[in-house]
Amino acid sequence: MGGEVYNRDKELKEAMDAGQEALRYLYEARNCLNSAGNWGVLDLFGGGLISTFMKHSKMNDAERLVQNARSALKRFQRELMDVDTIAEFHIQTGDFLAFADYFFDGIIADWLVQSRISDAKRQVDDAVRKVEYIMGQLRQL
């Protein structure tokens, strides 16, 4: 019985760590997208070369963070499945497992249009809410 507690605690810790990592990248990506959006607005109103450069720089940063978040979400997904195999627990992930598989597909290629930055921000916010919800469930275990 002692082994079961250790395994449960270990699996919970691994899931919590993976969720925290995913959230960190998602928060950073959201910040970059907000900044890119702000520079994009300035660029639309004639901000010049500096605003264009800064917008693209922030978009490149966000792209890197989105790719890191995608990897972290996949790890979180695997760790959640490990926790879910513990007989006494069942985490209500809803459609999160399917969501994690396709979350970031296509948004990076579309960032050149200002409205697509807003769409990407909404998708990142949605991911943050889903991960935060699951993390809350894990904390209650």
Image (spheres, helix red, strand yellow):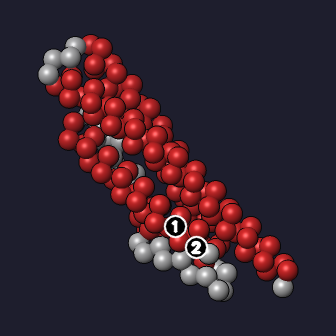
Callout 2 amino acid: Gln
User: What is the quadrant of residue 84 in the picture?
Assistant: bottom right
Quick check: can you spot residue 58?
yes
User: What is the quadrant of residue 41 in the picture?
Assistant: top left
Callout 1 amino acid: Gly
Image quarter hosting the C terminus: bottom right
Determine whether the residue tagged by mark 1 lies in a helix, strand or loop.
helix
Identify the residue under disc 2: 140
Determine whether the residue tagged by mark 2 lies in a helix, strand or loop.
helix
Left or right, residue 5 beside residue 18: right
Residue 17 spot, x, y in % from top left? 64, 56
In the figure, 29 relative to 94: above or below? Answer: above
Left or right, residue 132 beside residue 80: left
Residue drawn 27% across and 34% down? Answer: 37
Q: Which mark is residue 136?
A: 1
Q: CA distance from mark 2 to mark 1?
A: 7 Å
Left or right, residue 90 beside residue 33: right
User: What is the quadrant of residue 79 in the picture?
Assistant: bottom right
Residue drawn 40% across and 60% down? Answer: 129
- Kindly indicate whether the residue at mark 1 contacts the one at mark 2 (C-beta within 8 angstroms): yes
Image quarter hosting the N terminus: bottom right
Q: Residues within 10 Å of mark 2 (few under 14, many from 20)?
A: few
Residue 20 spot, x, y in % from top left? 57, 54
In the figure, 76 relative to 85: above or below? Answer: above
Quick check: can you spot residue 72?
no
Nearer to the camera, 129 or 57? 129
Q: Residues within 10 Å of mark 1 (few under 14, many from 20)?
A: few
Residue drawn 47% across and 61% down? Answer: 131
